[in-house]
Image (tube, rainbow, N blue to C red):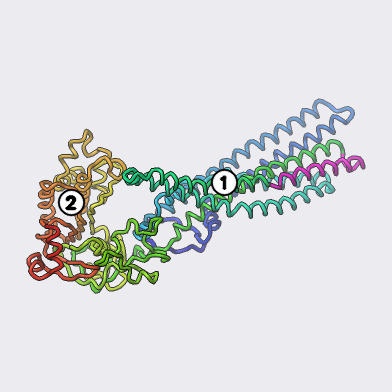
């Protein structure tokens, strides 16, 4: 089985591989793991439909029996028992068919969700920066659920319909071969009209799923940013935007209804059924059929009504399922720049970090790795704002040619194990971006970033990142207990270890003020805690992982001075044992750094100690005076 290989930063062990070249192949390759279920479903559908259809033959024989002089009660009883037996076969195998399809539906949904989730975890930060969370959630919930519905009842009814066409026609042939005329004519017209129906429905199904994703993404953004919306009195504008998105979804739904309203197969069936009855009566008049056989024939032809009727929505479910599978595969198959490098270097880090003529830029515009933009085309959620010129205008550099916006240019420095390096510069100068090249959140475009003398691209990604911790100003906490958030990087940590690092981070006292202490649920993104409390939990989390390289990105900005002093003492103690990169505007922290890098316009203009830079660097003096 051929599969599409996609770069990813994370991969589950023993993860099942599927053929991802197209939606249909992807779904079919999942079914190969449960080949017995489709086989069982088809066999059960066959017995179910033949059992139901055979009842019509028995009813016709009953008519003939009653028209036969001298019929007995025993003959009638045997015929009734045969009808009962056929009905029992229909019912039992109907349950088997339904169960087989339901198991298929649930397992395909599970495998698809697992594949999508593992794929999302393996995508690069650049990929996630340019995605709309609402659209991802729509694909991970509604689209995955649509695969389940496509199988049950969608494909179950399609399979039942196909077998439900074959079974009556086979039994009609047993009555009289001349009776096959109208069933064959009907099947030919049915195939022509149903293909036209599916052709017209396909683009509408795609549009429905896409417009739903867009509508859901807009709603998620508005709810996530409700504080900004209300703070700027933009409720009416957001309502208008949602109404426009909903109108697009409504228009597709109306178009879908128009296509379904012009569903021709039912008209074709009605005409053919009437013609079939007329044909049967002509044969009866010529003594080619008995009256009972006419009854059986008309009843069997009537069975073709069910597959004709259910096709109006079963093909829609199939189209929606394929459209959903295509949207899921778009995420799974999206290439990212980084790979986990399973065979890379995996060893303890000493802490030496070296940048050799490093340059980096965010790709944008038509590039597949462009930074996310708002509807107005401005940059959104990017780690660094576009660098500003002295006049305040953005300097796009190579970005104007549609390539990339250069944030860092020719960066070179060396940090020895155990050193504390402070990075200072104006907003947008590239401070945060520089630190994100160390743990390969992003890869350098030019030059090399080395850890312990080894290019970070040659490290096993899990080994590299597991020994580097970052504490940022915007702390993310999971909707779990405080203890689970602190132990996120070390799941097997003991309660004593968790409380010890909480003491170091000055978090223990406020944690114990809660009724449930360390077992308190913090809510989504930690909304039940203040900014300072969230930062202290993040600091405790970093202390517990005991990283060899520690990155502090304005990590105490929301903490009062007295608490910050105590945290600084703990940080100073642990920073002596590891390499620390410090981004802050607090002079008290900058002063105790072993080395200070001064960034301006994405370049290092100078580096040295606080006293050295204060004596010789005009850029540092200007920054220092602002901080002071």
The answer to whether residue 558 is left or right of residue 106 is left
| Residue 122 appears in view | no
The residue lying toward the viewer, choosing from 248 and 286, is: 248
Pinpoint residue 155: horizontal percent, then vertical percent. Answer: 59, 47
Q: Earlier in the sequence, mark 1 or mark 2?
A: 1
Residue 113 left/right relative to 49 = left
- Badge count: 2
Q: Position of residue 192 (x, y in %)?
A: 71, 54
Quadrant of the image containing the C terminus:
bottom left
Q: Nearer the viewer, mark 1 or mark 2?
A: 1
| In-image side of 263 versus 154 (left or right) | right
- Residue 224 rendering spot, x and y as whole percentages: 35, 46
Q: Residue at x 27, y 48 (%)?
A: 488
Q: Is residue 347 magenta?
A: no
The part of the image, by quadrant, that contains residue 435 is bottom left
Say which quarter of the image contains residue 86.
top right
Residue 253 tag number? 1
Query: Does the image show residue 6?
Result: yes
Name the mark on residue 58. none
Please rate how many residues cluster around mark 2, counting C-alpha atoms within 10 Å: few if below 14, some from 14 to 19, many from 20.
many
Q: Which residues are magenta?
A: 263-289
Q: Characterize the local packing of mark 1: few (<14), some (14-19) or many (20 or more) Cα atoms within 10 angstroms.
A: some
Q: Is residue 243 above or below residue 323?
A: above
Residue 464, relative to residue 182: is it above or below? below
- Is residue 286 rendered magenta in the image? yes
Secondary structure predominantly adopted by residues drawn in magenta: helix
The residue sitting at the front extreme is: 391
Q: Describe the element under mark 1 as helix, strand or loop.
A: helix
Instruction: Indicate which disc residue 556 carries.
Output: 2
């Amino acid at each position: 089985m051929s599969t599409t290989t996609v770069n990813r930063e994370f991969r589950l062990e023993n993860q099942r591989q599927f053929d991802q070249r197209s939606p249909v192949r992807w779904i079919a390759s999942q079914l190969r793991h449960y080949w017995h279920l489709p086989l069982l479903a088809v066999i059960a559908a066959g017995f179910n439909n033949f059992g139901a259809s055979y009842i019509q033959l028995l009813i016709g024989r009953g008519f003939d029996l009653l028209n036969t002089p001298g019929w007995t009660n025993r003959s009638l009883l045997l015929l009734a028992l045969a009808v009962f037996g056929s009905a029992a076969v229909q019912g039992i195998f109907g349950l088997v068919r339904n169960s087989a399809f339901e198991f298929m539906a649930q397992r395909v949904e599970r495998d698809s969700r697992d594949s999508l989730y593992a794929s999302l975890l393996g995508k690069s930060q650049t990929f996630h920066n340019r995605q709309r969370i609402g659209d991802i959630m729509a694909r991970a919930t509604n689209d995955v659920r649509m695969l389940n519905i496509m199988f049950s009842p969608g494909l179950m009814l399609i399979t039942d319909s196909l077998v439900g066409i074959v079974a009556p026609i086979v039994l009609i042939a047993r009555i009289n071969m001349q009776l096959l005329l109208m069933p064959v004519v009907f099947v030919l017209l049915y195939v022509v009209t149903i293909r036209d129906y599916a052709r017209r429905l396909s683009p509408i199904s795609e549009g429905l799923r896409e417009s739903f994703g867009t509508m859901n993404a807009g709603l998620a953004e508005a709810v996530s940013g409700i504080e900004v919306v209300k703070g700027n009195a933009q409720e009416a504008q957001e309502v208008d935007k949602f109404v426009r998105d909903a109108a697009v979804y409504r228009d597709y739904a109306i178009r879908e209804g128009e296509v379904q309203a012009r569903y021709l197969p039912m008209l074709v069936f009605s005409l053919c059924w009437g013609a079939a009855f007329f044909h049967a009566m002509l044969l009866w008049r010529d003594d080619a059929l008995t009256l009972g056989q006419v009854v059986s024939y008309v009843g069997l032809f009537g069975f073709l009504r069910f597959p004709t009727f259910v096709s109006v929505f079963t093909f829609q479910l199939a189209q929606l399922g394929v459209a959903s599978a295509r949207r899921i595969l778009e995420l799974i198959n999206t290439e990212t720049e980084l790979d986990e490098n399973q065979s890379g270097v995996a060893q303890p880090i000493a802490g030496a970090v070296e940048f050799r003529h490093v340059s980096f830029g965010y790709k944008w515009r038509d590039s597949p790795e462009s930074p996310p933009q708002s509807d107005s085309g401005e940059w959104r959620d990017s780690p660094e704002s576009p660098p500003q010129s002295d006049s305040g205008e953005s300097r796009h550099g190579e970005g104007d040619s549609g390539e990339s916006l250069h944030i860092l240019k020719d960066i070179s420095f060396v940090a020895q194990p155990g050193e504390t390096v402070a990075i200072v510069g104006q907003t947008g100068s590239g401070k945060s971006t520089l630190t994100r090249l160390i743990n390969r959140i992003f890869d350098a475009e030019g030059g090399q970033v080395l850890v312990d003398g080894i290019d970070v691209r040659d490290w096993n990604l899990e080994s590299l990142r597991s020994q580097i911790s970052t504490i940022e100003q915007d702390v993310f906490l999971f909707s779990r207990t405080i203890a689970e958030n602190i132990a996120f990087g070390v799941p097997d940590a003991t309660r004593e270890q968790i409380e010890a690092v909480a003491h170091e981070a000055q978090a223990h006292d406020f944690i114990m003020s809660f009724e449930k202490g360390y077992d308190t649920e913090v809510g989504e993104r930690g909304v039940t805690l203040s900014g300072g409390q969230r930062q202290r939990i993040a600091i405790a989390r970093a202390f517990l992982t005991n990283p060899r390289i520690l990155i502090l990105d304005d990590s105490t900005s929301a903490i009062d001075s007295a608490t910050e002093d105590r945290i600084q003492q703990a940080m100073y103690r642990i920073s002596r044992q590891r390499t620390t990169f410090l981004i802050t505007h607090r002079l008290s922290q900058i002063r105790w750094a072993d080395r200070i890098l001064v960034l301006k316009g994405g370049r290092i203009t100078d580096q040295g100690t606080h006293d050295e830079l204060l004596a010789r660097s005009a850029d540092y003096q200007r920054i220092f005076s602002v901080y002071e």
